[in-house]
Amino acid sequence: MRFQNLGIFVLLILIVIVTTSIEPSFAAAANLRSIVRDTGLYGLISIGVALVIITGGIDLSIGSLIALSGVLLVQIVNVQVVDTNFESRIVETRAEVIAPFTGAALRLEDPLPPIVKGDLLSFASTSGRSSVVIERVIDVGGASYIELRDRLQLLRPGVPVRLQTLQSLNPYVACGIVLVISAALGLLHGLLITRANLQPFVVTLCGLLIYRGLARVMTGDNQVGLLGALPEFKAFFTGAVFELPLPLVARIGSSQAAWSDIAWIEIPFSGVILALTALAAWVFLNRMVWGRHLLATGENEKAARFSGLRTRSIIVFAYVACSSLAGLTGILFTLELNSVQPGSSGSFYELYAIAAAVLGGCSLRGGRGAILSVIAGAAVMRCLYKAIIVLGISQEWEMVIIGVALLAAVSLDELMIRWNARKRRHSIA
Amino acid sequence: MPNQSRSPRISVRGLGKRFPGVLALDRVNLDLFPAEVLAVVGENGAGKSTLMKVLSGNQHPDSGQILVDSKQVSFRSPAESMRHGIAMIHQELNLADNLSIAENLLLGREPHRFGWIAKKQMLATASTYLQKVGLDEDPRRSLSDLSIGQKQLVEIAKALITRANVLIMDEPTSSLSHHETQRLMELITELRRDGVSIVYISHRLAEVMTLADRVEVLRDGRNAGTLEGGSITHDNMVRLMVGRDPQPLAKPGRDDSQELRLKVDELRVFDGIGGASHSASLVARSGEIVVLAGLVGAGRSELLETIFGARASLGGEVWVGEKILRNHTVTEAIAAGVAMVTEDRKATGLFLESSVRTNTTISALSDAPAFPWILPQWEAKQTATQIESLGIKTATQQTAVATLSGGNQQKIAIAKWLIRSPRVLLLDEPTRGVDIAARQEIYSILMKLASSGVAMVVASSDMEEVIAIADRVIVMHEGRIMGELTGGQIQEEAIMQLAVGGQFADMTKLAQSSVPNSKP
């Protein structure tokens, strides 16, 4: 039981070793950081779907729910450009970039009130009003310059400008609302499955269609984004939480480094939240009564019912957890990419998650699954994806390679089970 | 009686078959004469199934010979065995539910012309053989419309179409009603008269005594002895099967002054279609074993499941001690101290792929001391206690339950409730698929529980079991309680009389006359 899923860890290590030996830059700190980040994001939905698969069910709505929760987050946060009552006139513009400037800059007649990054200056142009984004304010020789993110465009001395600021809902409240909605959709799935006796495949297939459709309807099928709003919030949830020192890796990733150099790998927020979620899921499955009940219900629902377990609540819980994690992943993806493409964001992600769970040893018949192996399964797929990029294989091959790897891993697992069974039989005889 | 001077139709000499870890057949000999019923009996694991699989070509022996009509043969497939006239009627019927009776009968040998199935000819052949086995059904009907007993007749007809003269029947009556069992026994007697030899495998020794010309007893893969004629008695068979004399049960006396543990009042059982069967009332006192007797389909399992809350009730009350169960849910019943050992332990009792430990503790975790946490030490200790006190044979607590014998599985299905110290224990066919030795152990477990004050309601189809363990017998027929027997009234005849709805049906009479009733 304990070593049943050893294959997936072997596969993971094999992929890393083979890819690194062909192309050492695979082990570069930036690459490792992005693998950790992606494994974090895909790992969360893999854990969610693993819980559902353990009950013997399936959730196909994950990818659509990621898109929908992204759209919801953008719409609830509701970023709006609002005019302030600060008006002034441009005194001086600087187009050339000389230190300390890193972009085009200008100076106004009146001193600027305190601003936040992302505020704008609007001005009259031929096509109505236009605006430019303020990057920062620098004092040079007692004069206060406003550095712009964009080029100067039509800004010249004498042009009147007005300060604009971005208004939005508190992002924590918005995320809370998105998570509650996701959880409610999971609850709906669970109730339809346990109370209306609909098949999980059908219920969540409908979810896949409906949520994707809603995301497109709500946005008119246009990309939506957070623009320059919530810079600190975004920075916190996409930035590094801490840096993990790894010995030897620096030298492996680059021949310029010495063996004694330490590579500092930035661990992004998604990696940390995956670790916490995985720990919680592991404790739940292995140390808590409800987790045991979940496994038992998945193995034999009738026997579970006759043993006095609240099988319906247990199954509903699994769908709520899965949809909530999908909602959370949708939020993190939106913050990471700053925008949502309602027609394509998250599509196929449910299949990646299911693949990771199966790679991690979850049986689609239910009753079997280990969290650590599922994460290894998610990591295998992200490593394969990165390996394809690093090795310069054309992107079209990605799905082929992942499909073949999945097939190979599952076949290997089956072979090992048979081999073990035969060994056991012989050892008895 | 078989004519011993004639040569046997099938002769098995020194048959050996080894599976990893177990010698399933050890120099087994067997003779089957024309026109005889040979019963093969033995405990689970005695080698009956393996022997029959070898005879029907499903398995290849490691050593020994099989002679058919004095010529040595070697079967590499069931088809080769059938070519020599041997057909096996399996425990799990090998029929296709979605086809008609006729299509099933002639599956794979459909009469055809230019590639088209000759339907008329097919129906004619089917009718002939259905008549032969006494099944009065239109061959065009879908097989799914038939009862299990009728399906079995179809399977026998199918065997006869292949011109089989040896029929191997593996536990043919295990899911038949009383009437169907009688019909099958008559058919077997007719087939024997027509010259067919029958190998009859059964746990039901009463049937064996009724039918068999000879009895071959197997024990641990070896021949334990052959019984013939007058020596075919219950005690002789049991002695050869277990290798020692059967022990009588030490049963505590019945005591009406004990407190009432379970009171079922006018409980209306949902029949699963939309209606309610008749209402049922019963009581069980502390330390009492109440047996629900009756035929298959009498509604005993349904009644137990309704008391337990696993099946919807349409009215009536269930009291456990002073507490009434209002919600009719399993969780509520368990909380009140009710437990149920289900009939089909593989489907509703156990988690087969999970460990002995997980199975033993699963229903007690919610009330365990560290809830909602699982303490492995607590689990290990509880499981060890049960393994010890019930005598469960398992390598470790982590062993998967699927690998254990039926008897040990059944003990775990009981242990998972004993861990909660239930006040009322419902048991549905507690010894089904359990060998004789383990059966005795389960009986003594029940006796021990009775003396510790547990009230038990046991549904049982095994007449010997009913008589052995019951303080009181409640007999059901078609969902209705027909009557109650106590003390000296608990006798097979009285139970059967109530079980068939009040009409007298005497199994022993059938046993005495070798000529069956003529056709209606």
Image (cartoon, coloured by chain):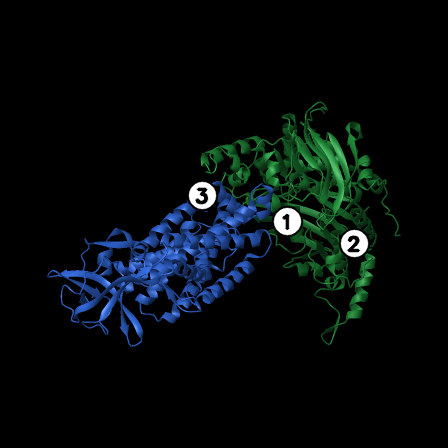
Chain colours: A blue, B green
Q: Measured along the vertical axis of the image, is residue B322 above or below residue B105?
A: above
Element on which disc 3 rests: helix
**Image depth: mark 3 or mark 1 in front:** 3
Task: Report in which chain the residue with disc 2 lies.
Answer: B
Image quadrant in which you'd find residue B116: bottom right
- Whole-percent x and y of residue B221? 63, 43
Q: Which residue is mark 2?
A: B196
Name the residue furthest top: B257
Mark 2 Cα shell of 10 Å, populated few (<14), some (14-19), many (≥20): many
Q: Which residue is mark 3?
A: A286
Disc 3 from disc 1: Cα separation: 40 Å
Residue type marked 3 = Asn
- Whole-percent x and y of residue A195? 59, 51
In this rendering, do the residues under marks 3 and 1 share a single chain?
Answer: no
Disc 1 from disc 2: Cα separation: 22 Å
The answer to whether residue B17 is visible is yes
Disc 2 from disc 3: Cα separation: 59 Å
- Whole-percent x and y of residue B98? 70, 61
Q: Which residue is mark 1?
A: B50
**Image depth: mark 2 or mark 3 in front:** 3
Residue type marked 2 = Val
Residue drawn at x 34%, y 56% as measured from the top left? A13
Q: Measured along the vertical axis of the image, is residue B519 above or below residue B238?
A: below
Image quadrant in which you'd find residue B127: bottom right
Q: Residue A402 vs residue A227: left or right? A: right
Residue type marked 1 = Thr
